[in-house]
Image: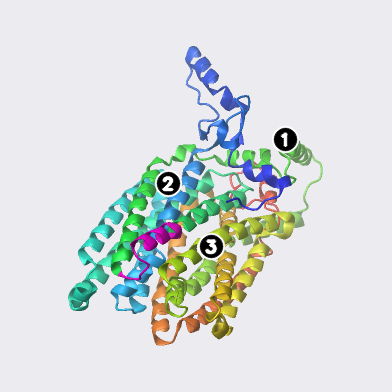
Amino acid sequence: MDVPTNDSNDTSLREPLLSSDDRVENEGETTAESSADGSTSTSSNSKDVVFPRWLLCRGRSSPRPSMNHNVALSLLLSVVYGLADSLWSGTVMAAYLKRLGREKNGPVGDVEAVSGLASLFSALPVGYFADKMGRDKVISAGGALIVITAIVHASLLEWIGTDEEALNNDDHKRQLSFVLFAGVMALWGVGGGVINGPSQALYADSTPAGRRSVYYMYLFACYMISSCLGPLVSIVLFQTLGDEWDLVHLRTVLYVGLALEGSAAFIMFFFDDNKSLDEDEEIQQASSGPNASGDPNDAPEKVDEEIAATATSDEGGIQPTEEEEDCDDALQKRRKLIPIILCLQSCVFALGSGMTVKFFPLFFKEEVGMSPSQVQIIYVLVPITMVLFSGVGEKISSTGFGRVQTMILLNSLGVSCLFAMVFAKKYLDSHPLILVPVYVLRTALMNSTYPLNESILMDFVPKNERARWKSLDSVVSFGWCGSAALGGWLTDKYDYTFTFLITAIIQSVGVFCFFALVPLVPRKEQELANAADPSADDVVEGGTGR
């Protein structure tokens, strides 16, 4: 499936990921010449993975497409991890835990809370070691942890068994199962923190400043598209084995998902810090890449104009006044608050989302009366719609509307859909053909702003601190998982709709947090790269464009 684009901007979207450099064609000749001279110079394309021409339907006379090594691995990891994660960790795992817990929602939330605690206590150490020791080393360690966790998880499922009558008569084994599940989910929390922290920090290090929202849109699209394949695989398994919510069928689907986690872990051993971009390269690629007009040929001319303008200013041309310099200094100080505001806003959203996200599948199962396959069809549609809206969001923001403004618009519409599910409950519960589109639209609107959010964070965080800030996502997930425990208790005490209402109110507060970013973040993302001085040390730390 393609992210929606128009013809005029097709080049600008494809170019950052698959670039064509004539030097790739002569790489063999360059290497041969270097060997003959006795030199050991590194090819300028040594940080890229070169792909065959047929990938873009090119002839033999055309240059071969290439992509940064870490960018290519990150996209591949998103595909495999998205497939594995969506297959077992969502609907299937929640249904398994509820079945094991005698149809109570509380155990589902409690296990999620333990996973969040593990993420909380490991997040900052993981980020710190990634910044100090190297992202690739920590990512490899995370891959080894995921392999071990998948084996332990599968062994626990085998030990628990599928005889529900025997489990009902053995309270000790049932309770011990939840304790062991909590330990396993804690390990998954740490492993997921590595993928969402150091792995994505290295992805940011390997992408050019000023164009990260496009890169993150593609990363988001890879994860979301693969996430719809997981429910499709589970539908096939359920239809083959029997479309029932019992431990036998749920465990089989879990086994398949855990096996795929091993494939994702294997990819994590091949990341390389040496193939990330230097700060000068980030600016250079952003300047020489496709510009806002969508014409790559205009980029060198614009870079020359910027250099000339800088030279004129340095030679005694137009100099900023003292008042303007004071304003710029004040703005830079305020911009250091951007990562903090984004983190606080994410915490608010996480508190609201955690109360309901794990319980939406159970809501469709119990209150709407859907079968496993019907529920999984919903979660096939959700990722596809997310990708569509992430493309729409990137398009809206790139017109000059602004990244923050776009996030406010889309998230406000998403919260409105959740309020509609609460206040029109009786009608929607009896009309699933209307309820499902409202839910899918709500989920897509709330999650499609991820590429914009991440691009802002990475644009305003120093390169040597990115892993730590990305690891704070795991701290945010603690709020998500902690509120999941509260959501399970509220759902058992009241009902699902009451919990949805609390979530909608909390997320409304989260939307208002975005307004603090409006005066700080430039409306046009490219201004960050265009206004940056490559000789400065803090080029990527915040830029100077407004």
Q: Is residue 171 above or below residue 338?
A: below
Q: Secondary structure at mark 2?
A: helix
Q: Is residue 392 left or right of residue 278?
A: right
* Residue denoted by label 3: 381
Circle 2 packing at 10 Å, graded few (<14), some (14-19), many (20+), is many
Q: Is residue 134 visible?
A: no
- What residue is shown with label 2? 135
* Pick the front one: 183 or 494: 494
Relative depth, front residue between 424 and 265: 424
The residue under the point 46% across, 71% down is 357
What segment carries the magenta color? 231-246
Q: Camera-side residue: 316 or 248?
A: 248
Where on the picture, by quarter, is residue 15?
Answer: top right
What residue type is disc 1 on?
Pro
Residue 460, how many percent across, how many down? 59, 54
Q: Which mark is residue 300?
A: 1
Check whether the beta carbons of the residues at disc 3 and disc 2 lie within 8 A of each other.
no
Which amino acid, by three-letter code, is at mark 2? Arg
Of callouts 2 and 1, the N-terminal one: 2
Q: Is residue 396 magenta?
A: no
Dot 3, how many residues are within 10 Å of its Cα: few (below 14), some (14-19), or many (20+)?
A: some
Task: Give the mark, 1 or 3, whose residue is nearer the N terminus.
Answer: 1
CA gap between label 2 and label 1 equals 33 Å
Query: Residue 293's spot in the image, x, y percent?
Result: 75, 45
Asked if the residue under mark 1 is in contact with the one under mark 2, i.e. CB atoms within 8 Å, the reply is no
The answer to whether 503 is drawn above or below residue 344 in the figure is below
The amino acid type found where label 3 is placed reads Leu
Q: Main secondary structure of the magenta part?
A: helix
The residue lying furthest to the right in this view is 317
Name the residue at 43% across, 87% down.
494
